[in-house]
Amino acid sequence: MSLHSILLKGGWVIDPVNGIDGEADILLEDGHVTQLGPELKVRPGTPVVEVPQGCVLCPGFIDMRVHLSEPGYEHKETVSTGLAAAAAGGFTAVASMPNTEPVNDDAGITGLVLAKAAEAELVRVHPVGAVTRGLAGERLAELGELREAGCVAVSNGVRSVADANLMRRVLEYASMCGMAVIDHCEDVLLTQDGVANDGFQAAALGLRGMPSAAEDIFVERDVTLSGMTGAPLHIAHLSTRGALEAVRSGKARDFPVSCEVTPHHLTLTDDRLDGYDTNYKVNPPLREQQDVEALLQGLQDGTIDCIASDHEPHHYDEKLVEFDRAPFGIAGLETVVSICLDRLIHPGYLSLTRLVELLAINPARILGVVGGSLGVGSPADITVLAPDLPVTVNAGEFRSLARNTPFDGWALRGGVAASIVGGRTVYSNSSVDGAVEFETVTSDQ
Amino acid sequence: MSQQADSSLGDPAGPLVLGTTVGLRTKDLLGIGDLSSEEILLILDTAEAMKEVGTRPIKKVPALRGRTVVNLFFEPSTRTRMSFEIAEKRLSADTLNMTASGLSVVKGETLVDTVRNLGAMAPDLIIVRHASAGAGHVVARLCSAGVINAGDGMHEHPTQALLDALTIRQHKGRFDGLKVSIIGDLLHSRVFRSNLLLLQKLGADVCACAPTTLMLSGMNRFGVRSTTSVDEAVDGADVIMLLRIQLERMRGHFIPSLREYFQRFGMTTDRLRLAKPDVIIMHPGPLNRGVEIASEVADGPYSVILEQVANGVAVRMAVLYLLAGGHQG
Amino acid sequence: MVAEQLARTVIRMAHEIVERHHSLESLALIGVRTRGVPIAKRLSVALEKISGTSVPTGALDITLYRDDLMRYPVGPQPILRKTEIEFSIDDRRILLVDDVLYTGRTIRAALDALIDFGRPRSIELLVLVDRGHRELPIKADYVGKNVPTSLRESVQVRLMETEGQDEVVIEEDEPAS
């Protein structure tokens, strides 16, 4: 057996798990990290990649919430285009949501997603199974079988479980199977057929409102149920101050709860809905400034565990309709890193170390998957950041099939230089000098 | 006028003389929110002049000769569509009506495709009525024709607010400091939103009155006085504008019954005693007699409801005329 | 032309009108907006002094009848003003009044507009100034003053009612920028 090795030389490494925040070399062998430290001595002939000036190597980013849309919605996105978008977005793994058609409530679907991912040979896919059959919120799905088929967690997709008793059983059963429940929280009796945050802006625009309380109430309920059952609960795309408070209080009582926020909820408010651009239509809806401020606070004080894209691709036809008829969702995979660097790191809200926690360490821990560390023996999943790279978002150049982003045209500071999965470079950014080296050297393997 | 008008007539390449020409800043009228108070007054002044055309033996002027106006009505409407159509015909425009039942939308065609097809036929103006807020914005983005919003969901109905303003001005001669109370289903009303914006821009003191369930979210940020007491709203009012209560509102738990609504919020001659002696009563129609308004009030001396209808034609002629000039940059 | 000359011209034209009409009974003056209107009113006052007959006046806005209205796809629109003719023009002798006669296009529009109000027995035209350069076969019946001009000049009529002073001046147009 030949040992495939590559030395990543001279980069700045941030690996909080191993207490590293400085210049270090990384030796990758057969898809794993085998040495990490300054000025590594390696066997002569080992291929070397000189890490481009200013680039930062982090444990591979894991996107907690991605809708790959295959099977069933291949016109929006396929597993392979979604994973290409993930690679370009700096992610080395994604958790794929179960709300496909048919729903991933069955080992066969889980197997299909994994097979498509293996075929794509890009980033890792961690399937997330459905909590109930068909996501109808009526009967438990066969969670044990889903676990065996490769699901790492279960979720209700974009439809909350209205029945509190069923939610209790979901938590208990999923916990027994070793899976967290990823929870979309919305009291649909309160949101009715709302399309925007319930408040001044929606009222002025004549759009039906979705009150914050609809999210708060279900987060409070499910945090309470998590405390009661002791079962791990992860709140997806948390968007309100009230919901954050509920998670904070759950954590204070040592309930096994965690939560994520999206870049759009951290940067946009419902003020943006002015022109009825359906690219701003998302669920949960864009909230108000006070919520954005609360979320930033939650990121800083540790209440928020993860940042996830909530990548929800749609065909342009589907978004090119009346606002109230357009589907919810933002294709976010390819903008997460730039938004985070420009809006969170450069203004000083967060450190890069904290960003690595939010995008790599905590997602790996909550999903119970490999990654989150560059320690010896870890998989060679590495996100290479170019924190000062000037980036202009161009939806037309997305790897994703979808173009539905509210960030098109935004000029941002910071981007992705390369994504390495299992020692193989799955993306390198041609606008970063020298980044293409990653691809050239690793593809020789 | 003749001198300067003639010089621009005689010299098509020369600049149109400033001071004798006017226009709106946008190619579309999507909402009162986009208009300045000067533009609102310009529309009202132009409408005053247009009113006279309706009094002539021959109620037709050649102003929009050769222009094509499409009335694109995705929602059933009788009075608004008729009002626009009369306005268009009085200005000699060629008109084309597309109403819900005749539209290919019922055959599954999207708004976008309908509008693109329409755009390919090069109309000059499109009048849009649609159940979705912002539908006019979609249409305006997709075609070069000027777009007039004739009601988009719960958002706006700008020509209704303009005709209401014309009616108020004819009776009161001013807006500044006028107490205008708007009573009824504020939440679902595009007429309320447009009127509120317009009256605020012109300096009126607007009071909004409804059951709490039919108020708008974030009401305090609209900068309007709101009350659930109809007596407080009527007290000292110069203008009372009543909004239609739709019968289906009971199903959404907004009101317990029409009977209770009328008892607590319906406008009766008795309640009107608190208003100014020269109060006027307005209603955008169609009326629900015995729900938001007693017949005695609707048919009484304070009612200007039919004047509103007459002013509707003049206001729409004014808007058509001003927008037919196209985008001013 | 200064204020005094202007006043004299109006009175002279009033005398001419009386001379040419056997009776002023069926006569009505209709001023073309903007400055034709005050001139018509002054004439009406003068006519009443001379003949003792009160001649009704009206105001006509020709904007909606202009021949250049819809010629360009884009451009601002002329300001629309109110037409006020509070009498029937059927079988009346109408005297159309304007300040300056130039290309004749305004008068063409005014004739079209008038016809929409009824069928007058006759229509005559009175202008304060005729500056020439006609583009249509139109001729005034009463002219206050013939003022030969070049195309680069413009004739400015200012009236007390509209500009706060009475005068007629010829101005050189600013070169088109």
Image (tube, coloured by chain):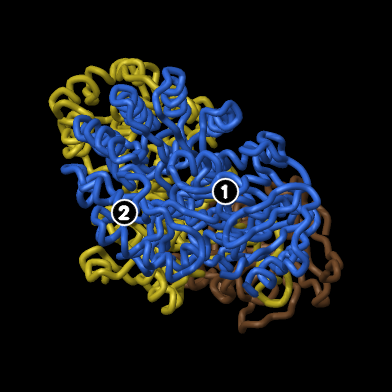
Chain colours: A blue, B yellow, C brown
**Residue B298, located in which quarter of the rendered image?**
top left
> Residue visible at 58% across and 26% down?
A301
SS at badge 1: helix
The residue that mark 2 highlights is A99
| Residue A342 placement, left or right of C83 | right
> How far apart are the two marked residues, 2 and 1, measured between alpha carbons?
50 Å
> Residue visible at 78% across and 62% down?
A50
Towards the viewer: B288 or A375 = A375
Q: Is residue C176 visible?
A: yes
| Residue A342 placement, left or right of C79 | right
Q: As displayed, is residue C66 above or below residue A146?
A: below
> Residue visible at 42% across and 59% down?
B53
**Residue C20, located in which quarter of the rendered image?**
bottom right
The amino acid pointed to by label 1 is: Glu
Is the same chain shared between marks 2 and 1? no
Contact check, label 2 and label 1, Cβ < 8 Å: no
Q: Give x and y (percent) for residue A327.
A: 37, 55
| Residue B236 placement, left or right of A193 | right
SS at badge 2: loop
Q: As displayed, is residue A114 above or below residue B94?
A: above
In which quadrant will I find the C terminus of chain B?
A: bottom right
Q: Give x and y (percent) for residue A218.
A: 32, 30
The amino acid pointed to by label 2 is: Asn
**Residue B39 image label:** 1
Q: Tag 2, which chain?
A: A
Q: Give x and y (percent) for residue B220.
A: 46, 25
Towards the viewer: B227 or A85 = A85
| Residue A408 placement, left or right of C122 | right
In which quadrant will I find the N terminus of chain B?
A: bottom right
Q: Residues within 10 Å of mark 2 (few under 14, many from 20)?
A: many
Q: Residues within 10 Å of mark 1 (few under 14, many from 20)?
A: some
